[in-house]
Image (spheres, rainbow, N blue to C red):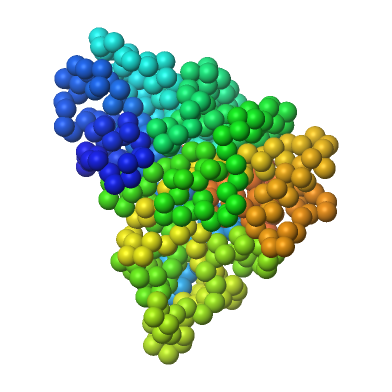
Amino acid sequence: MHLTLKVMRKNYLLAIILSAVLSITACTDLDEELYSSIPQSQFGGTSEEINSLIGPAYGTLVNYVNNDFWMQEITTDEYMIPARGLDWYSGGIHLRYHTHEWSARETPNFWRFEQVTTVNKIIDLLDNTTVEIENKDRIYAELRTIRAFWYFLMLDNIGNVPIVTEFEGELPKNNTRKEVYDFVESELLAVVDKLTEEKSTNTYTKATKWVAYTILAKLYLNAGVYTGAPQWNKCLEYCNKVVQSGLYELEPNFFNNFKVKNEGSKENIWSIPYDADYFRGYFIPYQMSWHYSSYLTFDVQFSSWNGPCAVPGFVKSFDLADARRNSFLIGPQRSSTGEVIYTRDGITPLNFTIDVRDFASATENEGARLFKWEVEKGGRTHLNNDFAIFRYSDILLMKAECMLRTGDEQGARALVNEVRERNFNPAKPLSTLTLDLLLKERGFEFVFEGWRRNDLIRFDVFKNTWDFKPNSDPADRHTYIFPIPLTIMDRNPNLTQNPGY
């Protein structure tokens, strides 16, 4: 399926995407034509057409928050999908994700080569056009940054993936995780000075220099996991580049970053401009999580599936005074006019509990539900809220972690308290900071933003037990990366499966 983007009601959205003809829907056959209005053989006749080519590369981000993103979340101590009778059992797959007993046949799919192929095809078209390209260096830099981001995600989740920079070629072989790490690093360092430093509505959602710096900081933060050689000082260096730009600051209200109209956030470094009409991905967390009758509470135009919920111990780890605890929907539920809502038996009032008694047979009421993004009255399945891939609070907490790990507890604690301050009234600063407390703080700050697995692995506690995960992971820690999906292995005999699978 192909979708030609029209002028969106969000006039701040990617101006480049708006002029492009994208292929961005749930059908992901991106190996064929990228354009549905202009034949590819005729494309490139004008500089405007050349400049619009970058649109499909940004279009790949629409599926960043996809089903596999949420399945990744349920492998952590933060999120889970209990079976509720026959609902959500699905042969036990969601239970196995949570207990780290998945197989190569049923793993989340983080093989992002459809996205990489899209970028490679655009680069190939630019390389082969006779049209003079305006701002060529910047366009190439943005394309390579987007591709490096997808490779960073594959590096983090799968590790040993092929490095492919040509649109066409033979079936590739795996590269080592260290080689993929080196590729992501070299790509970003090669282009970062060609990216714009501008932060404005014109560059909102674009790959700027500050986005590239943040990806590098994330890369170096986890270098010990990826290569065996920690790079705390390099991570600190790139965090400082973002801090010293003076372009970002913490929002005084944590939830400003998650409003329906959150494009004005001073904190969000790189966002995906979701739009319920024109830029829809799988960013439908409330439909997945809320009870079947929650539409009565929030006056929305969609029914929900009563599935995913928070892990009880994770919710209980929050200070009751921490405003970020409001990222969960807990307690009795009433309609927008104040009437009691009942479960499907018509007798039991709907009351979201924190505790879940039986992971394999939970009731309709059990489990705190997701409630982090502002709910739009009359909203539909797909949210209009933009999704922040990177926020400035992450820069501050990454910087704090590097400082703590290199011996500056006082400086690290000051940064953590700076992030905490807006969430407590009166303020409740930490008097001491340990790695365990810092990991908890990252959990409080980034609920359901996709970083919990990454954090647990870096702190080497992904193997541990937690609610409804009674057994530690195998000693070889092969669960710290996912397998290459068997569907991919079947199509490419040159690939070697990750160890342990």
Note whether 304 is above or below 53 in the view shown.
below
What's the residue at 80%, 34% (across, down)?
A: 406
Whether 319 is drawn above or below 136: the answer is below
Report the quarter where the N terminus lies.
top left
Residue that appears at 60% across and 42% down: 249
Query: In the displayed image of the protein, which residue is found farthest to the bottom?
Result: 347
Using the image as rendered, state which of residue 478 and residue 52 is in the foreground: 52
Residue 259's place in the image compared with 37, above or below, is below
| Residue drawn at 52 percent across, 38 percent down | 269
Q: Quadrant of residue 15?
A: top left
Q: Is residue 395 above or below residue 420?
A: above
User: As drawn, is 163 to the left or to the right of 458?
Assistant: left
Q: Is residue 93 visible?
A: no
Q: Which quarter of the image is occupied by the C terminus? A: top right
In front here: 143 or 116?
A: 143
Q: Quadrant of residue 357?
A: bottom right
Q: Is residue 147 left or right of residue 39?
A: right
Q: Where does the image place residue 349, in percent across and percent down from the top left?
A: 46, 85
Q: Position of residue 447 (x, y in %)?
A: 57, 55
The image position of residue 263, as x and y in percent, is 44, 45
Q: Nearer the viewer, residue 267 or 443?
A: 267
- The spot of residue 8 in percent (x, y) is 28, 44
What is the tally of numbered marks visible in this picture?
0
Of the pair 298 and 27, the residue shown nearer to us: 298
Could you tell me which residue is drawn at 75 percent across and 53 percent down?
Answer: 437
Residue 311 visible: yes
**Left or right of 433, for residue 320:** left
